[in-house]
Amino acid sequence: MSQEQWKSKIGFIFAAAGSAIGLGAIWKFPYVAGTGGGGAFLLIFLLFTLFLGAPLLIGEFLIGRKTKGDAITTYQRIAPNSSWGIVGIIGVVTCFILLSFYSVVGGWIIIYLFEALTGGLTGLSQDQYGMLFGEIIANPLPTLLAQLTFVLLTIIVVAKGVQKGIENASKIMMPALFILFLLIVIRSLSLDGASEGVKFLFVPDFTKLTSETILIALGQAFFTLSLGASAMVTYASYLPKTQNLPRSALSIVLMNIVIAILAGLAIFPGVFSFGLEPNAGPVLIFAVLPAVFSQMGFGMLFFIAFLILFLFAALTSAFSMIEIIVAAMTKKDKSKRKKYTWTIGILIFIVGIPSCLSYGVMSDVLVFDKTIFDLFDYAVSNVLMPLGALLISIFIPLKLSKSELFEEIRLGSHSGKMFFNVWYYLLKYFTPVAIIIVFMDALGLIDK
Ligand code: PFF
């Protein structure tokens, strides 16, 4: 079977980091942290990321590289004649629903970019930025067009194939994003009253923690690392045996944490300085950042650069979502790649239309008390991804022996027995137990 391979080790890290770093760290983290009370949320999120996310990421990498299979085949190869392939199917469904609303937010970035380039964002007051954004996303035609543009960009790159499409660009854009974030943070921290925002982000107030926020922090940890959807399984299937999996995983975890904290530091000082509410929800970053930029020299120029990188980060994550589905569907016939990518992409756009309209004409349509956008987001982040993660953490130690796993981890790395044992026991016991407890707690099944 011929499999594509990543061109270089660093290329893989950037591509996998590109999948991980996206709207999750930049757009979602600040608003879920803002709604979840700030510091306490950050702390729980970090603990979940380090003790559940990192081991699971190594695990997903490991089975992907070992089997060289797509999301579904991987489980079938390791456990033939079993129903474990369902884990891959959950991943495919997750990515499908995820991209349907992810592309809505991707579209918002495109609209903002257009507005910034055409001067629509210049010279407004802080309140006006928030209001303008509300007006923009309520307007069906431009938002749908922008969403479609985002989906089309994703389709075009992925239809071309993994190597050419994803790898090259990530190497430049990711470091650029990081540097620009540093600049924004420096500006944010020098705003009047910035320290309130820093306190909000770093000083935990545990009274704000509820069972629901703990579940959201768990979902967020998986979401930002693209875990539970077998995305990282698929990406690692293109890896040579010489790749150091633990090191790749840990560097991705670290980059992701740094970007999430930078996003928080870019936004919360502005929130407090401008007297906004930290729990403004999905609109938070779009309402706050333009106001921060407007206070910088050459602000609009920096803002445009930021939007381009933000869009790129969202796209590299979107590539991985569609790649998982396409890889699973074209395993027998690679020549259908183009056709499937287009078909799936267009279907995703159609399914995403109600999410897009959730901020406008369909804002009154509520299911379980949530708009369609919020419902899809909730289902993916707080149900499907933790469920996928739970099943993967059970699957790996159940179906692969300890010695097989040790052998596989050692390929390309010099991990000792001690590191391996910590990883193994975290994955085998801590991860499933923690996920089950958080689920049960959120469902109100645990007496306090
Ligand atoms: N990790 C991506 C982000 O934080 O934006 C989202 C994501 C991508 C989740 C790919 C799942 C996935 F399969």
Image (cartoon, rainbow, N blue to C red):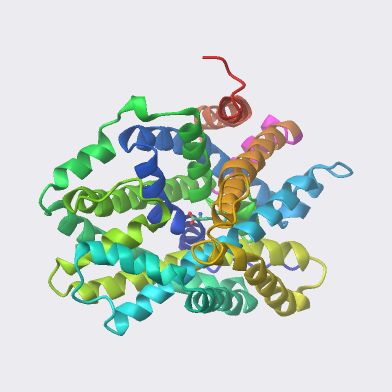
In the image as oriented, which residue stretches furthest toward the front? 364
The answer to whether any part of residue 414 appears in the image is: no
Left-right relation of 282 to 321:
left
The question of residue 306 being in magenta is answered with no
Pinpoint residue 359: horizontal percent, then vertical percent. 49, 62
Q: What residue span does the magenta drawing correspond to?
A: 399-414
The overriding secondary structure of the stretch rendered in magenta is helix
> Where residue 309 appears, x then y in whole percent?
37, 69
In the image: residue 285, left or right of residue 58: left
Provide residue 31's location: percent of width, then percent of height.
38, 49
Image-quadrant location for residue 21: bottom left
Left or right: residue 180 versus residue 95 is left
Picture residue at 61% right of the left edge, 47% below the top: 379
Say if residue 87 shows up in the picture. yes
Observer-nearest of 177 and 380: 380
Q: Residue furthest bottom?
A: 118
Above/below status of 225 relative to 153 = above
The image quadrant of residue 82 is top right
Farthest residue, direction right: 81
Q: Position of residue 329 (x, y in %)?
A: 77, 65
Q: Is residue 405 magenta?
A: yes
Quadrant placement of the N terminus: bottom right
Q: Which residue is drawn at the image coordinates 30% and 74% (left, top)?
A: 305
What count of labels does the image hold?
Answer: 0
Q: Quadrant of residue 69?
A: bottom right
Name the residue: 25% across, 66% down. Answer: 128
* Most foreground residue, 433 or 398: 433
Image vertical order of residue 324 relative to residue 430, above or below: below
In the displayed structure, does residue 267 sit left or right of residue 208? left
Foreground residue among 247 and 346: 346
